[in-house]
Amino acid sequence: MQQAKRRRIENNSKEIRTVPTRFDDLSNEIICEVFEYLDAYDVYTSFLNLNIRFQNLVLHSNFPLRIDMFLVSNRSFHRYYTRFLLRRLHRIHSLCLLNSFPMALIILLLQNTSKFTRLRYLLLDQIELVYLENLLLALTTISSLSSLNIIYNGSESGKSNIYDLIFRLPMLKYCKMTFKTGFDANLPPADNNSFSPIKYLYLKGECKLNILSSILSYTSQLRYLSVDTLDADASDPSEILSVASNYLLRASISLGKIQPEQLLSFMSRHFTHLNMLQLSKSANNLDVYQWKALIFSHTPHLRIVISHH
């Protein structure tokens, strides 16, 4: 009995001694999982020259790469791109691009867009219109891209093309558009071949009812909608499309320059299946609690939540 107990104690002591106490004691599989949560530039600069084992893991493993250009200086990028990224574009699953980079480097990426076969998330922050349009056009051939975050501060003339190109992306499920000058470009209603698979849509910037109506005509699969500031427009309400969003169950709206009857009319045309509405701030004389009472009196089945930003 004592001998068996002693053997168990010895075995437990051996197990304790084998518990990893340093990062390089971890298995290759666990280290690669950790790398997935780090930016690829940090992995490249911190581990490539550490030792042969880590060099092999960085260069020859197949873990997905997260690329955030906010973290890389212009001077460092070219070497990083040519020595490391160029041969591993197929491993990139998350990519953040910003306008402060030299256009020559963004062109390099444009020329190799077809290699981004695992790209799932893309952030484009104030890229010049001509490069933005070319990049979005190239992305229509990538079937893996499911999430897009785009920040644009350019002219109205380019916005309609941006809408059109975004709605062409074949597997896009999540889309956040931040237009600092507002959603004010003319957008024709969707035709029978222009439907987008987007399910979660976030619009940050002033958006008028007629523009939102056209956007909804492209996004028939929408489940959730968030509008940063919803304004009325000069259009006759009867001219606004009556396209019901059959799958749209939840919406979050920040009220701008709009009257209750205008919003109720719009909701009756588009939000026929909505079961939860989150409201925040109002630019007119009604506070959001008065809005809630008015909307609830017309749609008693709807759960309305007041949000204070």
Image (cartoon, grey):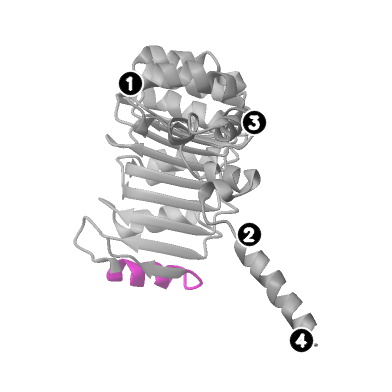
Place residue 219 in its image quadrant: top right
Between the C-alphas of marks 3 and 4, the distance is 64 Å
Residue at 23% in and 64% down: 286
* x then y, percent, for residue 81: 47, 19
Q: Which mark is residue 18?
A: 2
Amino acid type for the residue under numbered disc 2? Thr
Amino acid type for the residue under numbered disc 3? Ser
Residue of label 1: 74
Amino acid type for the residue under numbered disc 1? Asn
Residue of label 4: 2
* x then y, percent, for residue 13: 64, 70
Between the C-alphas of marks 1 and 2, the distance is 44 Å
Contact between marks 3 and 4 (CB within 8 A): the answer is no
Amino acid type for the residue under numbered disc 4? Gln
Between the C-alphas of marks 1 and 3, the distance is 30 Å
Which stretch appears magenta? Answer: 289-302
Which residue is more in the foreground, 242 or 27? 27
Secondary structure of residue under mark 2: helix
Contact between marks 3 and 2 (CB within 8 A): the answer is no
Contact between marks 1 and 4 (CB within 8 A): the answer is no
Q: Which badge, 1 or 3, comes first in the chain's sequence?
A: 1
Q: Is residue 255 visible?
A: yes
| Of marks 1 and 3, the one in the foreground | 1
Residue of label 3: 143
**What number of labels is visible?**
4
| Of marks 1 and 2, the one in the foreground | 2
